[in-house]
């Protein structure tokens, strides 16, 4: 490997070459591909911002340069110099007339880059996730994920929500310990958080409108295409909010996220072969149906689900396929939901809660509720759920001093990315996925 | 507690009352304080966006309302209705002429809110952190933290960096296991990440410019005012970057963060009694001195530090007090630093690394380096540091296929917030701090 040469010609990112037509530039990156057509060589370079086709015509360059380009191998790292030319047929609309090439590291033919353009099995790709990210498809998903996260943060910031990060290390279980990862915390035990909600409730009493946004953990032995053990969740919490406010906030958020991706990631959606039409249909307002209506629709569609059951993955798919935008199902049976959900005063056997199901069979992306604000009712629910009051002492304090109606929801980032990108499996939505059988690399 | 009444008068956030002078509005929030002056009552309300003084003149209201206001206790939750009046003497520049009050929960005199305006010990406050956040001072710190994080993300997004979150659960230690928290991962062991850097390096080879930003963990038995066991860190990584690029990126970032806080958080800095003048001095460029020069300055100032030692907390303070803006100390002895740092080609006993020390004695806020990009040198360093090559197999792959010079840094959010807010102790910079002796609430 050689050191980077000093060169007065400016380094330009591939995505910005369109502003340098006719100019001499340098690019730095990696060889993505090499195509040969008689006396013409077409190396394809990538630099993280885009793909660039360079052209080398044998009669215009020295035999040494021609041979050097011809010897390029996939993922060799390079500096290239040349003149930018507009070409509508080329990826990105520009080509590079290459005249100087510096190879930083030539990947040897004897030890080639492991991920060739041929098909590989998913285990092989996941074992090489640190390299697989370089593929156009995986990099496109990461860019969509980036815009989804950015849109979420911008949305809450613009709505006046103050970020208050919840802790990852927690002393007790939010909803029982069976799905918690245990951590050795000096001479004590701790657990990885499943949700920042309880902490967000405390922050909402301080800040009025708040959100937390970080990794959360579930030690579920699920092997479905919708489950990761480590995933990112955004959780807004609003003082004085009631169920309708929560539903409206959730639909505005999802609409803003989809709009942002459509605005910034058209090329990525194309790379992913994701039809943007279903995303363009995501407009306010979203349909809202009660659990009872959802049940009747699901039963009509052939499910054996009964009143009192939570919706299974198959039921969610049956239902969400009936709508062209996310559907909000509210007022589930209280018995199927978490201890902290406020009962409907007009019908206490149902909770003032909502799940939002993404269209196209992608299932639940948002789950939320109004929270119980009455101290005695909350105590009663802890007891009914066999949760120790001592573990929730500080949480009960929020109902003891200055309690107000409040509520919020959690939105799982990976499920949203899977839906927006049209992915079969959630494992491609996060840079380094963690599942029951995978904690490498 | 009563249910929220239906009322046609709009609910307005306290921070936005200045746009409603002369209008009738409702506010919803909590009682912060109550002052009485003869026939006048001045309840002070908070709603998370600001503080509002209301006025109740005995002869203008019913005896019932006067008595009701007079009975208000700290942190009782309320809805209040009245007319907004400009008043320069009042906090926020407006007052509320209160005529309707609905008390949602009256905190009883027999069980008062635990955090009264009197002084409390730090253990008591930390045990009541879920309530302490409601104090003006703590809420101001959280708002500064929010703007710091927002500024960091905006900065990298605008510079073309793509977010790629590193995993929290990792299979092996980045720099030895002595300061790692161990997690029971199904039938296996895992560790909580200390740094996303190694993963960010993989992402940089895919995306060119990337950053990760999440919680990180150190099981250090440190009890200093600068240490938390759980803290948030942003870590950019740039392909093709060399030490000078890394230093320039770091100084631009810190300048942008400080400018954002000065733009958005003047009131918060006032609440914190933080003199903004030292922050206004934070302008580009930052001083850059070599480790050798730093050592000589520190020795002159009386330290017994010797060449080869890392800077201790006291040394950092001695040095940083000599500058009116953050100082970047580069090229430390390689032996004092991590295994992955690129040696200076002109002087291999020093590493191409940099630490940025905040002014006013706040110590290290940024640590970064150029990374070793040569496969054989990296292997040699792993061996010298007694790290098993098998644990770093995927990391070595980055040097095997398409290796390029690259580098980055980590910036600890809590230390930056402590410095900007002028705090004595880092524990107030995060909503729910975790230290060796504290994992509650």
Image (cartoon, coloured by chain):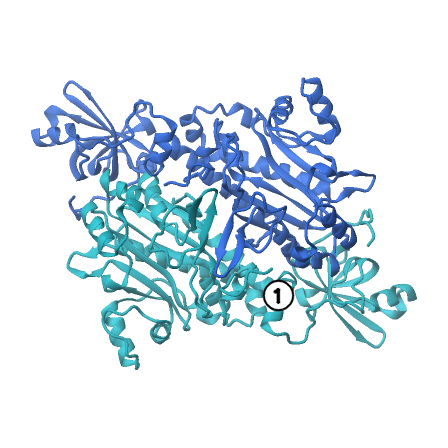
Chain colours: A cyan, B blue
Q: Is the residue A173 above or below the residue B49 in the image?
A: below
Occupied quadrant, residue B327:
top right
Q: Is the residue B422 above or below the residue B10 in the image?
A: above
Bin the neighbour count of mark 1 within 10 Å (Cα to Cα): few under 14, some 14-19, many 20 and up: some
How many numbered dots are placed on residues in this image? 1
User: Furthest residue to the left?
Assistant: B63
User: Furthest residue to the right?
Assistant: A63
Where the N terminus of chain A falls, by quadrant?
bottom right
Occupied quadrant, residue B397:
bottom right
Determine if residue B402 is in view. no
- Residue shown at 29%/56% (left/top)? A369
* Horizontal side of residue B148 vs B176, given as left or right: left
Q: Which sits in the foreground, B1 or B93?
A: B1
User: Element at badge 1?
Assistant: helix
* Horizontal side of residue B188 vs A319, given as left or right: right
Determine if residue A136 is in view. yes
Where the C terminus of chain A falls, by quadrant?
bottom right
Q: Which sits in the foreground, A278 or B338?
A: B338
> Mark 1 belongs to which subunit?
A
Q: Is the residue B118 above or below the residue A139 in the image?
A: above
Q: Position of residue A266 (x, y in %)?
A: 55, 64
Q: Position of residue B89 (x, y in %)?
A: 31, 22
Q: Position of residue A184 (x, y in %)?
A: 47, 48
Find disc 1 in the rendering and name its residue.
Answer: A127
- Residue shown at 12%/27% (left/top)? B60
Q: Position of residue A121 (x, y in %)?
A: 61, 74
- Residue shown at 30%/37% (left/top)? B47
Q: Is the residue B207 above or below the residue B273 in the image?
A: below
């Amino acid at each position: 490997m050689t050191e980077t040469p000093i060169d007065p010609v400016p380094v330009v990112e591939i995505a910005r070459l369109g502003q340098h037509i006719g100019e001499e530039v340098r690019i730095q990156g990696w060889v993505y591909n090499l195509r040969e057509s008689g006396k013409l060589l077409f190396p394809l370079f990538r630099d993280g911002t885009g793909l660039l086709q360079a052209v080398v015509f044998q009669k215009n360059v020295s035999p040494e340069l021609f041979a050097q380009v011809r010897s390029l191998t996939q993922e060799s790292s390079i500096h290239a110099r040349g003149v930018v030319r507009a070409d509508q047929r080329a990826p990105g609309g520009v080509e590079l007339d290459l005249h100087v090439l510096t190879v930083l590291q030539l990947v040897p033919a004897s030890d080639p880059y492991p991920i060739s353009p041929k098909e590989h099995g998913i285990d092989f790709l996941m074992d090489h996730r640190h390299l697989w990210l370089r593929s156009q498809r995986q990099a496109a998903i990461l860019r969509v994920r980036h815009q989804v996260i950015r849109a979420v943060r911008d949305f809450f910031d613009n709505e006046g929500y103050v970020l208050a990060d919840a802790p990852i290390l927690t002393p007790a279980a939010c909803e029982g310990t069976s799905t918690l990862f245990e951590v050795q915390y000096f001479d004590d035990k701790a657990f990885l958080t499943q949700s920042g909600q309880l902490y967000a409730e405390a922050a909402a009493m301080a800040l009025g409108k708040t959100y937390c946004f970080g990794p959360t953990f579930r030690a579920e032995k699920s092997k479905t295409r919708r489950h990761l053990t480590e995933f990112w969740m955004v959780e807004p919490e609003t003082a004085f909010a009631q169920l309708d406010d929560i539903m409206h906030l959730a639909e505005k958020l999802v609409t803003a996220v989809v709009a942002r991706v459509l605005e910034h990631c058209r090329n990525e959606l194309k790379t992913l072969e994701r039809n943007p039409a279903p995303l363009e249909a995501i407009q306010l307002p979203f349909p809202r149906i009660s659990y009872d209506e959802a049940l009747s629709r699901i039963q009509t569609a052939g499910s054996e689900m009964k009143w009192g059951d939570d919706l299974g993955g198959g039921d969610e798919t049956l239902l969400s396929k009936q709508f062209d935008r996310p559907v909000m199902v509210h007022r589930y049976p209280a018995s199927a939901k978490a201890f902290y959900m406020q009962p409907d005063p007009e019908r206490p056997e149902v909770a003032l809660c909502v799940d939002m199901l993404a269209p196209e069979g992608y299932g639940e992306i948002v789950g939320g509720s109004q929270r119980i604000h009455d101290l005695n009712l909350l105590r009663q629910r802890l007891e009914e759920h066999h949760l120790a009051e001592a573990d929730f002492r500080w949480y009960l304090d929020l109902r003891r001093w200055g309690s107000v109606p409040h509520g919020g929801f959690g939105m799982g980032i990976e499920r949203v990315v899977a839906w927006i990108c049209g992915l079969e499996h959630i494992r491609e939505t996060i840079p380094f996925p963690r599942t029951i059988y995978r904690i490498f690399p």
